[in-house]
Image: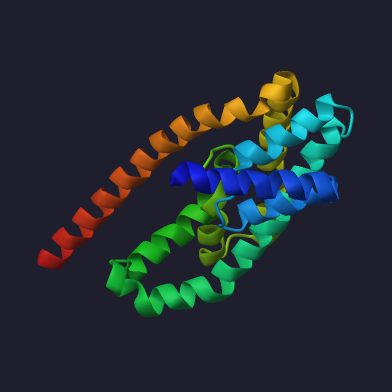
């Protein structure tokens, strides 16, 4: 089932980039960065493959991908900024999110937001969703944009470069990324379990 979904997404990505060129690369990465898990391990390596055929330039697809990341991340940021905090304050108790948790998130992004956004843009899975909590915590917007771009550019360049080197075998990169996704997913799941246990213990006390 998962393979069929990935196959359909891959077809959509390939068709969009083939049809719209650099704009297609930017659009696909914008969707991926707007909390919609469109696989970047297909978008950028395929773009890199087209670099190897002479249709694109490496820096061209890298910049297009990074700009797309900024656009999609901006949308997710403003959704979190205007809708996330009020919704979290009103309904957070139903998912064990307290005002103290929100204050902790605010303080975290004030102190470490630059690093968190930059580093998260280099990680699969996490990079797709980091913009929403940054918006909820109302991180400084100009800094958010700057560090989103700075983190996205090397990520896009690296995947495109690998796709260029792999040539016709560009799609084999997805296998390794799925393994990495699984590892990150385990860490997220463990963190979620610890979060729930902590809040349930607090309620009992």
Q: How many marks?
A: 0
Residue that lies at the very extreme toward the top in this rendered image? 165
Q: Nearer the viewer, residue 80 or 167?
A: 167
Colour scheme of this structure image?
A: rainbow
Image location (x, y in percent) of residue 59: 84, 33
Q: Nearer the viewer, residue 121 or 9?
A: 9
Q: Seen in the image, is 109 located left or right of residue 200? A: right
Residue that lies at the very extreme toward the left in this rendered image? 205
Q: Residue at x 74, y 51 (%)?
A: 68
Q: Nearer the viewer, residue 91 or 45?
A: 45
Q: Seen in the image, is 52 located left or right of residue 163? A: right
| Residue 6, quarter of picture | top right
Image location (x, y in percent) of residue 53: 85, 26
Image location (x, y in percent) of residue 195: 27, 54
Q: Residue at x 40, y 76 (%)?
A: 89
Image location (x, y in percent) of residue 14: 72, 43
The relative height of residue 52 versus residue 151 in the rendered view (above or below) is above
Q: Seen in the image, is 79 located left or right of residue 167? A: left
Asked whether the viewer can see residue 25, the reply is no
| Residue 43, quarter of picture | top right
Quadrant in which the C terminus is drawn: bottom left
Q: Residue at x 46, y 58 (%)?
A: 107
The relative height of residue 163 versus residue 66 in the rendered view (above or below) is above
Q: Residue at x 52, y 51 (%)?
A: 111
Q: Seen in the image, is 183 located left or right of residue 63? A: left
Asked whether the viewer can see residue 36, the reply is yes
């Amino acid at each position: 089932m998962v393979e069929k979904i990935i196959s359909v997404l891959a077809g959509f990505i390939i068709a969009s980039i083939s049809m719209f060129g650099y704009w297609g690369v930017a659009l696909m990465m914008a969707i991926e960065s707007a909390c919609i898990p469109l696989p970047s391990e297909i978008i950028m390596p395929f773009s890199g493959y087209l670099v190897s055929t002479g249709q694109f330039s490496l820096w061209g697809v890298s910049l297009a991908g990074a700009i797309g990341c900024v656009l999609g991340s901006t949308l997710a940021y403003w959704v979190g900024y205007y809708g996330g905090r009020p919704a979290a304050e009103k309904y957070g108790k139903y998912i064990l999110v307290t005002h103290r948790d929100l204050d902790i998130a605010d303080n975290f992004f004030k102190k470490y937001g630059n690093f968190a956004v930059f580093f998260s843009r280099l990680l699969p899975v996490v990079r797709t969703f980091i913009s929403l909590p940054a918006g909820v915590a109302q991180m400084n917007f100009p800094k958010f944009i700057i560090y989103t771009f700075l983190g996205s550019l090397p990520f896009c360049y690296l995947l495109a470069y690998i796709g260029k080197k792999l040539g016709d075998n560009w799609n084999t990169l997805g296998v390794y990324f799925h393994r990495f996704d699984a590892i990150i997913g385990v860490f997220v799941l463990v963190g979620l379990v610890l979060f729930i246990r902590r809040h349930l213990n607090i309620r009992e006390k």
